[in-house]
Image: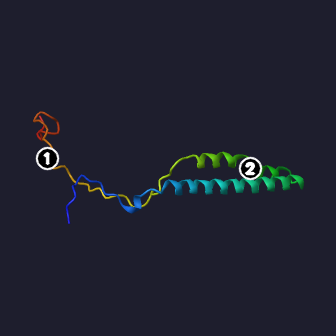
Amino acid sequence: MGHTGRGQQVHLVTQARRSRSDDIAYRQRRYLLMMGIRTVCFVIAVLLFLNHFGWFTAIPAVGAIVIPYFAVVFANGGREPDNVRGFMEYRPNVPATRDPQPPPPGHPNGDSRRR
């Protein structure tokens, strides 16, 4: 068993990113889901309009108009971090190895006697 150097960075499995193909497939599924919701909103808006529901028609119509913008932004957003609140790599908080120099005698924090 060999000893690895202290400077070598260790990666945990929980920090591994999704593969590129998995990431693209995830974004495609999310886009198709949002566009499916948009289609349902559009159909509901048409049905409400044909049945003379007045301003209630505007609610799903606004959804059908706004959802494509967010779907495209999310689909083209690029790779997202997988591990936002999960395990983080261990980084020890080690104090400095040398003591700080004391302030000079004339410095307000260096002399405890008041003149």
Seen in the picture, residue 33 relative to 1 is either above or below; the reply is above
* Residue 106 position in % (x across, y down): 12, 33
Q: Nearer the viewer, residue 108 or 47?
A: 47
Type of amino acid at the residue the image marks with label 1: Asp
Q: Residue most toward the bottom? A: 1
Q: SS class of the residue under badge 1?
A: loop
- Mark 2 residue crowding within 10 angstroms, few (<14) / some (14–19) / many (20+): many
- The image quadrant where one finds the C terminus is top left
Label 1 vs label 2, nearer the camera: 2
- Residue found 83% across the figure and 50% down from its top: 55
Residue 11 locus on image (x, y percent) = 34, 58
Q: Quadrant of the N terminus?
A: bottom left
* Residue occupying the point 85% across, 56% down: 47
Looking at the picture, the colour scheme in use is rainbow
56 displayed left or right of 19: right
Circle 1 crowding by C-alpha within 10 Å: few under 14, some 14–19, many from 20: few
Q: Which corner quadrant of the image does residue 28 belong to?
A: bottom right
Q: Which mark is drawn over residue 99? A: 1
Give the percent coordinates (x, y) of residue 7. 24, 52
Which element carries disc 2, helix, strand or loop? Answer: helix
Residue drawn at (11%, 39%), measured in percent from left and top?
Answer: 113
22 vs 54, nearest the viewer: 22
Relative to residue 102, is residue 40 depicted above or below? below
User: Which one is in front, 79 or 61?
Assistant: 79
| Residue 82 tag number | none
9 with respect to 104 (left or right): right
Check disc 2 and give the amino acid type: Ala
Residue for badge 2: 64
The Cα atoms of the two marked residues, 1 and 2, are separated by: 65 Å
26 on left or right of 86: right
Tell me which numbered mark, 1 or 2, is placed earlier along the sequence: 2
Tell me where residue 99 appears, x and y as whole percent.
14, 47
